[in-house]
Amino acid sequence: MAERFTETLRRESEPDWSAAVGHRFVEDLCAGTLPDPVLADYLIQDHRFIDSFLALLGAAVATSDSFAARLRLGRFVGVISGEENTYFLRAFNALGLDEEARNKVPDKAPTAGFKAIMREAAATRSYAAALAVLTVAEWIYLEWAMRAPRPLPPRFEHAEWITLHDNPDFRDLVAFLRAELDRVGPAEEKTSRDFFRRTVKLEREFFDAAFD
């Protein structure tokens, strides 16, 4: 049986893929031992590209050739705009980070890189390009979140970030994204491979930057 297209892309993205999934950042997060300053810095940076991420999701909705896919992506837009954004705001409050303090923190290079690649993929008007970035962004998070030991850490700042990325609906989303990229990606193989590979590299760099 031929290897799935998404599996090929993941294999070709090594060693960055495994470095991201098994990163010290996610291991400390899942153990509940991540220092607050590191978590705060990470969350500030991660929250910065929600706007670009929503724009990318909108581009995927607009360029998809499937009504069912548009519905599924639309539900995900609701999650990002709702539960995930609310988690950020609650975590910022718990960590004592008001908007003024957050705004004083400049974008790190991987944050700027993520914003750029999301807007670049959206601008291509290619469903495959959008899917390549989305699939990496969600699949890597599912993989590390699934590895989290139970019980989860007691503080919601750690535990809810894990459960947001390991629950039945999120697993279904990743399965959907992979299936869609398997379906349309081979017809735009060069584009899909390029965006997939660059996004994996950014994921690794983003976790590295949390300890800068």
Image: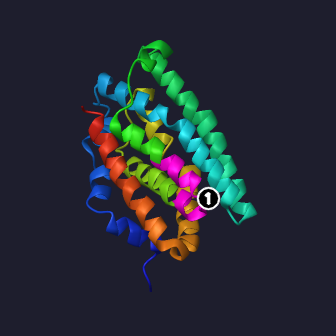
Up-down: is 1 above or below 172? below
**Is 157 contained in the magenta span?**
no
Res. 127 in view: yes
**Quadrant position of the C terminus in the picture:** top left
Viewer-side residue, 152 vs 75: 75
**Which quarter of the picture shows residue 39?**
top left
Residues drawn in magenta: 117-131
Q: Position of residue 147 (x, y in %)?
A: 36, 50
Mark 1, residue position = 125
Q: Residues within 10 Å of mark 1 (few under 14, many from 20)?
A: some
* Snapshot colouring: rainbow
Majority secondary structure of magenta residues = helix
Up-down: is 57 above or below 212? below
Residue at 48% from the left image edge and 66% from the top image edge = 191
Q: Say whether residue 41 is left or right of residue 103.
A: left
SS for tag 1? loop
Residue at 41% from the left image edge and 47% from the top image edge = 145
Residue at 50% from the left image edge and 48% from the top image edge = 118
Q: Say whether residue 103 is left or right of residue 50.
A: left
Q: Which residue type does callout 1 highlight?
A: Arg
Q: Say whether residue 130 is left or right of residue 153.
A: right
Res. 151 in view: no
Residue at 36% from the left image edge and 41% from the top image edge = 110
Viewer-side residue, 20 vs 131: 131
Q: Position of residue 71 (x, y in %)?
A: 72, 55
**Is 125 contained in the magenta span?**
yes
